[in-house]
């Protein structure tokens, strides 16, 4: 286990930001930490990285107890805090050299910085001031500082918030790339982010964990089919044959030759539907696929 959180409670004065939270993140996993604003995500991440203490409970990172061995813990963790605080007056290279100097490393500092600049796609911007960079590039600098000491564990707090769609995809790809050899916990309120990169989803609401599931199993929580399809044929299909298509578990006649198909599984059911039409001498006049998404599950679990 890379991260073990046991019964962590955090009080800010009277307010309970975390209430007896426990979970684990296995080595090599990418876990999405999902929750509405104010749920306690950033607080949990600050506690895991040793930036603030828990009121009670325990956190272990690679077997080291956070709070007693914070220097070593920080060496093992790369942390991108929420809002990515950087020094706008510093140059990219200068800033990364500064961060690298904090960590002892056997690799030459120049090699270390050059390789991280390359990995995070910062080559064209490396000589600029941080303050003059676009938000997407600033986020890359944030990732570069989190990765520079080759930590095993990455904690990313809202890494793609405020980026445009292209930047989001670029940063996600960077995270996925880094995730090949690291354990990652990333907080987000964007469900597609979890869909795109995570293996497991932990949902937190009002300081309490309300779901902790493998991504592929999360749909079963609210018993929603994964794929919902509206299909219109040119004439009436055989309902029994339609229902016998792989992964289809419900077919419903809507009107005329329009049918609603509910299917499970990751395998797209649409090719099988076209196949069915061809084999039965039918024509598909229209087809719309609606994916049951995490958004619905999230709303279901966190609406009060
Ligand atoms: P999230 O990251 O999920 O949006 P936070 O961890 O930032 O949530 O906040 C959880 C709760 O704790 C919120 O109600 C927030 O207002 C409160 N909180 C966070 N930081 C502090 C602080 N330094 N002092 C007092 N309350 C805080
Ligand atoms: Mg937050």
Image (spheres, grey):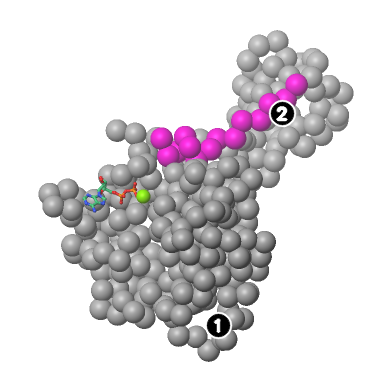
x 31%, y 76%: residue: 70
Kindly indicate the quadrant of the structure image that contains residue 66: bottom left
Image-quadrant location for residue 120: bottom right
- Residue extending furthest left? 14
- Can you see residue 225? no
Viewer-side residue, 113 vs 80: 113
* Quarter of the figure that contains the C terminus: top left
Quadrant containing the N terminus is: bottom left
Classify residue 67 as left or right of residue 35.
Answer: left
Please name the residue that numbered disc 1 is placed on: 109
For this rendering, which residue is in front, 224 or 144? 144
* Local secondary structure at mark 1: helix
Q: Position of residue 249 (x, y in %)?
A: 61, 34
Q: Position of residue 209 (x, y in %)?
A: 32, 51
Residue at the spot 53% in from the left edge and 65% down from the top edge? 91
**Is residue 13 or residue 200 the one in the foreground?**
13
Q: Position of residue 126 (x, y in %)?
A: 61, 65
Q: Which residue is mark 2?
A: 242
Earlier in the chain: of badge 1 and badge 2, it is: 1
- Which residue lies at the image location 64% right of the left edge and 17% below the top edge? 253
The crowd level at tag 2 (other Cα within 10 Å; few <14, some 14-19, many 20+) is some
Answer yes or no: do the residues labelled 1 and 2 have beta carbons within 8 Å? no
């Amino acid at each position: 286990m890379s991260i073990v959180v046991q019964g962590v409670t955090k009080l800010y004065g009277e307010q309970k930001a975390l209430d007896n939270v426990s979970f684990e993140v296995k080595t090599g996993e990418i876990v999405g930490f999902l929750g509405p604003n104010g749920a306690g995500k950033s607080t949990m991440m600050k506690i895991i990285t040793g930036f603030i203490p828990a009121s009670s409970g325990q956190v272990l990172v690679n077997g080291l107890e956070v709070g007693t061995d914070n220097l070593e813990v920080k060496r093992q963790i790369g942390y991108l805090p929420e809002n990515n605080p950087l020094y706008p007056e510093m140059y990219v290279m200068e800033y990364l050299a500064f961060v690298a100097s904090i960590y002892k490393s056997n690799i030459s500092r120049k090699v270390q910085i050059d390789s991280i600049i390359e990995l995070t796609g910062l080559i064209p911007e490396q000589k600029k001031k941080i303050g003059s960079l676009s938000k997407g590039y600033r986020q890359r600098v944030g990732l570069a500082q989190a990765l520079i000491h080759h930590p095993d564990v990455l904690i990313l707090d809202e890494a793609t918030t405020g980026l445009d769609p292209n930047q989001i995809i670029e940063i996600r790809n960077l995270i996925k790339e880094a995730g090949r050899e690291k354990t990652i916990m990333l907080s987000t309120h964007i469900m597609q982010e979890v869909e795109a990169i995570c293996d497991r989803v932990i949902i937190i609401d009002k300081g309490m964990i309300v779901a902790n599931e493998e991504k592929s199993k999360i749909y079963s929580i609210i018993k929603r089919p994964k794929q919902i399809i509206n299909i219109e044929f040119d004439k009436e299909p055989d309902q029994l044959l339609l229902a016998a298509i792989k992964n289809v578990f419900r077919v419903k006649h809507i009107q005329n030759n329009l049918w609603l198909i509910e299917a499970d599984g990751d395998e797209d059911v649409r090719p099988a539907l076209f196949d069915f039409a061809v084999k039965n001498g039918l024509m598909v006049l229209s087809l719309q696929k609606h994916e049951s998404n995490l958004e619905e599950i999230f709303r279901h679990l966190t609406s009060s």
